[in-house]
Amino acid sequence: MMQRPARRWLGAVLVAAVVGFPGPACFAIDNPDAPDLVGDFQARAQAFESRIGAAAGSTREITAAYAEYEHFLDAELGQAYRALAAKLGATERASLEKAQERWLAYRDAEFRFIEDNWAFAQFGTSAALSRGAYRTSIVKERALALLQYLKNYP
């Protein structure tokens, strides 16, 4: 028979598993006075995402909105990368450079797959919309990751 403290601990673990444990990120202590880089980025991105939703009448308009959004995301990604690199020592910066090179190779491979797979012949006019959505989601995820890393530095 289990001891009471062991039961409580096991119960807490089971509740976390069922309810959904928020993960290790919740253990980080953020500086409340630091700028909210992630929130600021998401607010800027929301303006582009809203334009995509508002352009719902025309495939051409939506495709143009996705192109603008991707351009914005590329610029944000570059800015986040440079800001993070500036905070790192030489060894860590070299590691970040290698990681970014590998991520760019991944991105390029994904973009090729997206272009090859979501073709007009298979998906009609929605192919362009899918390509835009998938491409931007890949770049947005990387920008967010770099901004999350950047939050760790004063």
Image: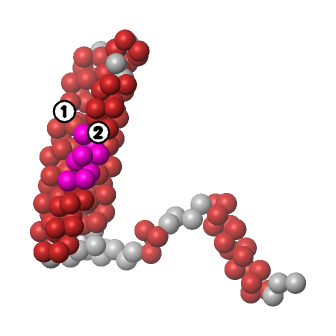
Q: Does the magenta stretch mainly form a helix, a strand or a loop?
A: helix
The residue tagged 1 is 68
Task: Where is residue 87? Give x, y as percent.
Answer: 15, 72
Q: Name which residue type carries label 1.
A: Glu
Q: How many marks?
A: 2
> As shown in the figure, which amino acid type bears the numbered disc 2?
Ala
Q: Position of residue 10 (x, y in %)?
A: 72, 76
Among all residues in the image, which is located at the extreme right? 1
The answer to which of 4 and 119 lies nearer the viewer is: 119
Q: Earlier in the sequence, mark 1 or mark 2?
A: 1
Q: Secondary structure at mark 1?
A: helix
93 vs 37, nearest the viewer: 93
- Residue at coordinates 22% horizontally, 56% vertically from top-left? 100
Against 84, residue 2 (above or below) is: below
Left or right: residue 97 compared with residue 30 = left
Q: At x 28% / y 66%, what residue is drawn?
A: 149
**Rounded to the nearest whole Å, what is the CA distance between mark 1 and mark 2?**
21 Å
Q: Residues within 10 Å of mark 1 (few under 14, many from 20)?
A: some
Residue 15: where, in percent of width, then height?
68, 67
| Residue 2 against residue 128 in the figure, above or below | below
Image quadrant containing the C terminus = bottom left
Q: Nearer the viewer, residue 27 or 107?
A: 107
**Residue beneath disc 2:** 109
Residue 16 spot, x, y in % from top left: 63, 67
Q: What's drawn in magenta, residue-wise?
A: 101-108
Asked if residue 139 shows in the view, the reply is: no
